[in-house]
Amino acid sequence: MLRMAARRVVFVYGTLKRGEPNHYWLTKKENGEAKFLGRGTTAVKFPLVVGTRYNIPFLLARPGEGNHIEGEVYEVDQAMFAKLDELEEYPDYYDREEQAILTEQNETIQCWLYLIRNFPDKMLAKKMLTSYHNTTEQPYCETYLESCPEDLAMDE
């Protein structure tokens, strides 16, 4: 059981979801503890797009535009929260903030989620998703860990 003092609730909408390429980050014991709490949807609409040459899902910090985003809710300990910050290159690449998430149980809870604040406007012209799934048409590229914030500006 996670200690209450170290408890964080996070909402994941992309490659960290079950069945997606980075879900293993949430299951590796050396990263810390993560407990799946259920599915959820953002209370506020956001643009969710796939971009850069690495086909990374990006939640763009433009609340009120796009769709209510579907994802998963996890309770994590401080060690896992720090590992997620590392994966998301917070605060240099992604930022994070708390947002209201509607759960399957029809409750609203506050969760941390990662989003991109500084992005070129052309990202808003991309297809806006409700839910991310890695596909063969646009496969996620694991080498994105070599990417940098400037890759957003070069997105085509």
Image (cartoon, rainbow, N blue to C red):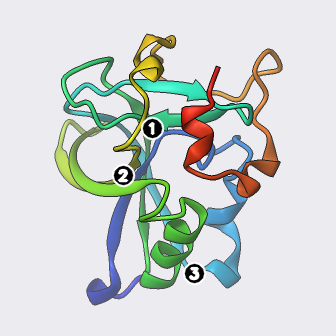
Q: Are marks 1 and 3 in contact (CB under 8 Å)?
A: no
Give above or below for 124 relative to 6. above
**Viewer-nearest of discs 2 and 1:** 2
Camera-side residue: 137 or 29? 137
Residue 1 visible in this rendered orientation of the protein: no
Which tag, 2 or 3, sits closer to the chain's start? 3
Give above or below for 7 relative to 69. below
Residue 91 point in image, percent of width and height: 41, 65
Camera-side residue: 6 or 46? 46
Give above or below for 69 relative to 110. above
Secondary structure under the numbered disc 3 in the rendered image = loop
Q: Quadrant of the N terminus?
A: bottom left
Residue highlighted by disc 1: 71
Residue highlighted by disc 2: 113
Which tag, 2 or 1, sits closer to the chain's start? 1
What amino acid does circle 3 point to? Answer: Gly
Q: Are marks 2 and 3 in contact (CB under 8 Å)?
A: no
Q: Residue at x 37, y 24 (%)?
A: 47
Secondary structure under the numbered disc 1 in the rendered image = strand
Give above or below for 85 relative to 24. below
Q: Residues within 10 Å of mark 2 (few under 14, many from 20)?
A: many
Q: Residues within 10 Å of mark 1 (few under 14, many from 20)?
A: many
Mark 2–mark 3 Cα distance, whole angstroms, equals 18 Å
Q: Residue at x 28, y 84 (%)?
A: 4
**For residue 86, side relative to residue 108 (left or right):** right
Residue 32 - label: 3
Residue 124 visible in this rendered orientation of the protein: yes
Secondary structure under the numbered disc 2 in the rendered image = strand
Q: Quadrant of the C terminus?
A: top right
Mark 1–mark 3 Cα distance, whole angstroms, equals 21 Å
Q: Are marks 2 and 1 in contact (CB under 8 Å)?
A: yes
What amino acid does circle 2 point to? Answer: Leu
